[in-house]
Image: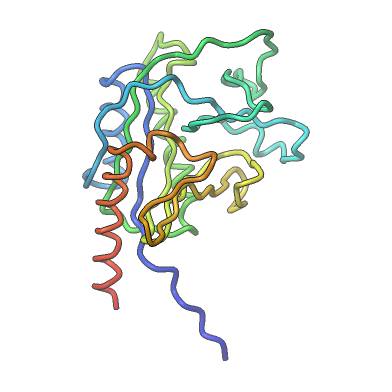
Amino acid sequence: MVRMRPYGAAKLICGVWAVDDGLVSRAVQLLTRAYGGVFARTPLMPVAQPGHDIVPREVGVSEENSAMRPLQLEGQRSAAESGHRPDDAGRAPQTSGAVSPVMGVQQFVGFGHRTTAAQLPDAVINTAAVEEQLIDQLVGLDAIDVPVLTPGYVHPAKVVLAHRVDQPQRVYLAPGAFAEPVLWYGPRGWRGHPWTPPALLSHDGLTFVGRMRDVALDDARGAS
């Protein structure tokens, strides 16, 4: 009988973008209620607003997926994706012309919480709930300025982020949840992909990922 090997230790992370550091702190505080204290974090990095996944009808996703509030952290966007949030019915508003990026700050935080790829859909649901709490608390804040949260994990061999719509490089996990490998670990250290968020490729980003990898390795050794 074939015995399946366990996947191994991985540590939960989350990318947070907001228009100012106060909103980032508020989002992180809400995350700690679900996942415990922050083990490691990057410095606040000034960046332009990441694009938001708007579910294009031509990709053939279900109505269930397209109705989800599409928020995510991303470094580079495809031409099929808009910079607007959906309206209350979950449909992208019709606009013309380019959208000026909103400047803000970005931070990645890591938790001691152990996770697996199978738990990423739950992380997508939980971070969406945090976004909804922030929307409820921040009365009067423009919709485009609401913080954007993207969960994921650091495994000793890779870093994976979870998104709400499909793209060619993403792998289906569950309705409204797709895994995207953004870094892999080789003989010369961490390497990225064309779609890897620049923040994770920066010195601060790689230092953060390295710390989380060390903790994941310690967990793996302790479980062996």
Q: Is residue 220 left or right of residue 152?
A: left
Residue 173 image position (x, y, % from top left) = 58, 53
Residue drawn at (37%, 57%) of the image: 188
Q: Residue furthest bottom?
A: 1
- In terms of image quadrants, where is residue 147? top left
Residue drawn at (48%, 43%) of the image: 124
Residue drawn at (45%, 11%) of the image: 142
Q: Can you say whether 182 is above or below 7 in the image?
A: above
Near-viewer residue (48 or 33): 48
Q: Quadrant of the N terminus?
A: bottom right
Q: Residue furthest front?
A: 188
Q: Quadrant of the C terminus?
A: bottom left
Residue 153 image position (x, y, % from top left) = 40, 51
- In terms of image quadrants, where is residue 155? bottom left
Near-viewer residue (40 or 148): 40
Q: Is residue 86 left or right of residue 57?
A: left
Q: Is residue 90 left or right of residue 101?
A: right
Residue 157 image position (x, y, % from top left) = 41, 61
Residue 141 image position (x, y, % from top left) = 41, 11
Residue drawn at (66%, 44%) of the image: 168
